[in-house]
Image (cartoon, rainbow, N blue to C red):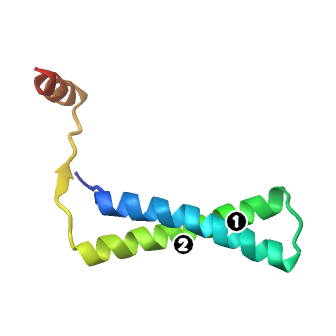
Amino acid sequence: MTLELPSIWNILISTIVFFVAVWYFNRLLNEQGIPKGMTRGLVVFVLAYLVSWGTGELVDWVAGPQPQVEMSQDASQLLKQLGAMQR
């Protein structure tokens, strides 16, 4: 089983984009006169998440394929590998 990890650029850029999107959507909804509340906060969060996720996918697409990590099904083998890394 293989696991494809996101690139460091994906994590950095999508985090920055998330906070910019939160600021932008809050400003947009303030200008529309929509009152603050739980629903508005959830809408802002979901929209910012979607924009951030899309940006992260775009960054990974531009960066190209990342090396894949092999996943072990055996827990004891995983523990042995972790013990070897600590030495």
Residue 81 location, quadrant = top left
Residue 26: image location, x then y, percent = 73, 68
Which residue is found at the position 22% from the left and 74% from the top? 64
Residue 34 location, quadrant = bottom right
| Gap between marks 1 and 2 measured at Cα | 11 Å
Q: How many marks?
A: 2
Residue 10: image location, x then y, percent = 36, 63
Instruction: For mark 1, give the secondary structure.
Output: helix
Residue 44: image location, x then y, percent = 70, 65
State left or right for residue 57 relative to residue 84: right
Residue 28: image location, x then y, percent = 74, 76
Which residue is found at the position 31% from the left and 70% from the top? 60
Image disc number at residue 44: 1
User: What amino acid is at disc 1?
Assistant: Val
Image disc number at residue 51: 2
Instruction: For mark 2, give the secondary structure.
Output: helix
On-image quarter of the C terminus: top left
Which residue is found at the position 23% from the left and 38% from the top? 73
User: What amino acid is at disc 2?
Assistant: Val
